[in-house]
Image (cartoon, rainbow, N blue to C red):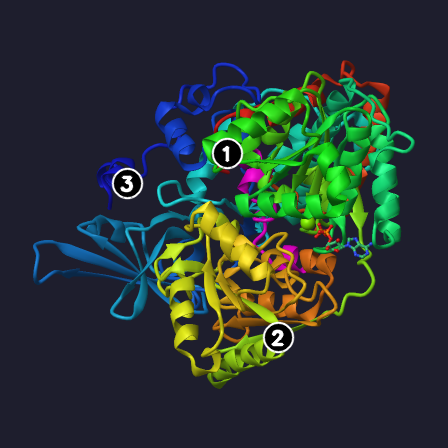
Amino acid sequence: MTADEADAAGAGGARAGVGDDAPSLVGAYSLDTKLAGALGGRTAQAVERAFGYLTVGELLAHYPRRYALRGELTALASLPLDENVTIVAEVLEVRERTMRSRRGSILEAKISDGTGILTLTFFNQAWRARELKPGARGIFAGKVGDYKGARQLAHPDYELFDETTQLSADDEAAKRWAESPIPIYPATGTLASWQLAKSIALLLDGLGPVDDPVPAAVRESRSLLGQREALEAVHRPANESDWKSARRTLRFTEAFVLQTALLERRAELRAHTTTARHPSPGGALERFDAALPFELTGDQVSVGAEVADDLAHPVPMNRLIQGEVGSGKTVVALRAMLAVADSGGQSALLAPTEVLAGQHLRSIVRMLGPELSAELMPTLLTGQLPMAERKKAMLRAAAGQSRIVVGTHALIGETVSFADLGLVVVDEQHRFGVEQREALRLKGKHPPHVLVLTATPIPRTVAMTVFGDLDVSTIRELPAGRAGIESHVVPLAARPAWRARIWQRLAEELAQGRQGFVVCPAIEPRVAEDDGGESGDETDAATPAASVASVLAELRAHPAFAGSRIAPLHGRMSADEKDATMRGFAAGELDVLVATTVIEVGVDVPNASVMVVVDADRFGVSQLHQLRGRVGRGSVPGLCLLVTSAPAGSVALQRVEAVAATLDGFELARVDLELRQEGDVLGATQSGGRSSLRLLRVARDGDVIADARSLAQELLASDPRLTEHRALAAAVRRRLDAEASGYLSKG
Ligand code: ADP
Ligand code: MG
């Protein structure tokens, strides 16, 4: 027991806390009442420490994870070691024995749920035998430990069911009692489920009337409960249908408040005015289009038209373009920059890494050709430039000479100024949050138009939930002439012998004059690539991941690669080194890059045909999809080998298999949502932590979200300032406050 737990446990093991030091219910609480005032300081502190909640409304939005029935027996057979569990079980026998080595006694109680037996142990608490009698049933919580091969809970918390209520079977009260579901809350080691239940019950008892954020008419048309009623029923249901309708109500409310907040923010953005940008006849855009060596795809044309239309209005554009890797988003963005240049303005293009910024600049210069490049002076501006060059670049940006400035996201945090910043293009949205977009808006005299590019396909529901304040355009069509990619899983757990075949295939491709990538999750055996963004959720810290260093050594020693030029690429190399390596690879001076995910986005080498991902299960689904997109970009067919040691049937393996099974990024995004842990969908940076979704699941609740959005739209159309809908306005404010407060990683 830690000192903290000992303190919480108090004398005699009775849990401190809940309600002990709570003031009596003087008046009614509102959702905004501080927990300290409602529960008492100690309990409030424990709740804040565990979950970050400060107000009554926040704790009341801590909904049960599931409901247990009193008669329900939870599978004891498969208790996970070292996890906090809550189970409903019956006491079988209780034994007390004295310890040989130390003074004192151990009380051991065996409990069962019919599927297995679990031992509870208590040191020097023989008195518990008085309540833990054979046949007693209750709910037990603690951390699952292992003692000589048997599962046990040491000093669990428990609450026995009230025996006096077990009257005769036909008694109405007994029946009701037996039917009432027990809420099981997400709990922590120091705050057990029923302690939360008690605190929440206290709050509900003292809660005054709650205004309904959902207007009565909507409530009626969707058969929803009132807010107060729903809170009551979700926490203290009398039966199953109670909590089900409560959840439905609360889920809808959540979607409705969220959509209102997003739509309001969107309206706010649109309330600003900015400069409309039109291409000029005979201008840069026209000349660029005339010289374009290929036909734009249909989607490029239509998305381009949407962007052009946004730019032509004096309202700041906020548009997300999503499209497969290689679908030609960059071309669309460049055409937008040229329209802005025609109108005398500047554009900034922000990439997630220095390598990508450098690459963007080179490909822009190449696409523009010498004449337009000389006129528009595309300029690189990153933190790692030598001071003199950096100064020069800053001058060009400030003087308006450079119409296109390419840099990393760091550009926005810095003292870079522009003569007339008309457009900001952000490549790869998933590392770019709302705050950054906000900071950007403040860069120009007028807020610039913003165009966000992402190759991570976002299902419509997620787009609506997370980026509800952005307009979304989609490029689905790939340019013609792509040779395609073949993907295979190499499941080493089942087929260890296939390992040799991987390097053989790579060598075969090299023999045909092609190039390849080998991607590893780590740089050195113990150094992760922190530049790499998300990683698989199921990484096992105990087994070191394959690393660039070890794979590089392996390949260099391998006879099949005797004449091959192999180089590492990772985030620990200096910008110059990375750049030189990338250039060498692009120029065909290197055959194989052994890299981390620094090559994930944007790297464009048409001659590269093989992508080997080692320990593929350690990467996210979308990351694997992005990595695969690095090959098969030209007329050379691509081969992607996803190597994994994940055991057969594991979710980790399923995710890798899903990637191999389809090239459709939208399908993958959907599969990813399904396979991922709920709640993990948005990621902390996007969902805003403490305020993150409670009952709403974007993977499942697309219909609810869409319905709520259109209702919110209607409502805002008639009452844009929500003056007639005070409760909704308050709920929106609460949500935004929570988002703005510092609890970003909690929740
Ligand atoms: P994305 O940014 O979506 O990954 P890019 O804009 O970088 O894609 O385009 C990938 C490659 O395809 C580039 O080499 C680009 O020049 C080329 N490309 C873009 N659009 C077309 C098109 N319509 N037809 C042929 N090639 C295209
Ligand atoms: Mg790109």
Q: Secondary structure at mark 3?
A: helix
Q: Are marks 3 and 1 in contact (CB under 8 Å)?
A: no
| Residue with the mark numbered 3 | 5
Report the magenta residues as a range.
Answer: 671-691
Q: Nearer the viewer, residue 8 or 618?
A: 618
- Tell me if residue 605 comes above or below residue 366 in the rendering: below
Q: The disc labelled 1 sits on which kind of residue?
A: Leu
- Residue 375 x, y percent position in the rendering: 74, 33
Residue in the picture at 59% in, 51% down: 678
The image quarter containing residue 349 is: top right
Percent x, y of residue 133:
32, 56
Residue 668 covered by magenta stretch = no
Q: Residues within 10 Å of mark 1 (few under 14, many from 20)?
A: some
Disc number for residue 744:
1
Rendered residue at 63%/52% (across/down)? 602
Q: In terms of depth relative to the viewer, which is nearer, 15 or 349?
A: 349
Query: Badge 2: how crowded within 10 Å, few (<14), some, or many (20+)?
Result: few
Tell me the kind of residue under disc 2: Gly
Residue type at numbered disc 3:
Glu
The numbered dot on residue 607 is none
Q: On the image, numbered disc 2 is attached to which residue?
A: 513
Sequence-first disc among 3 and 2? 3
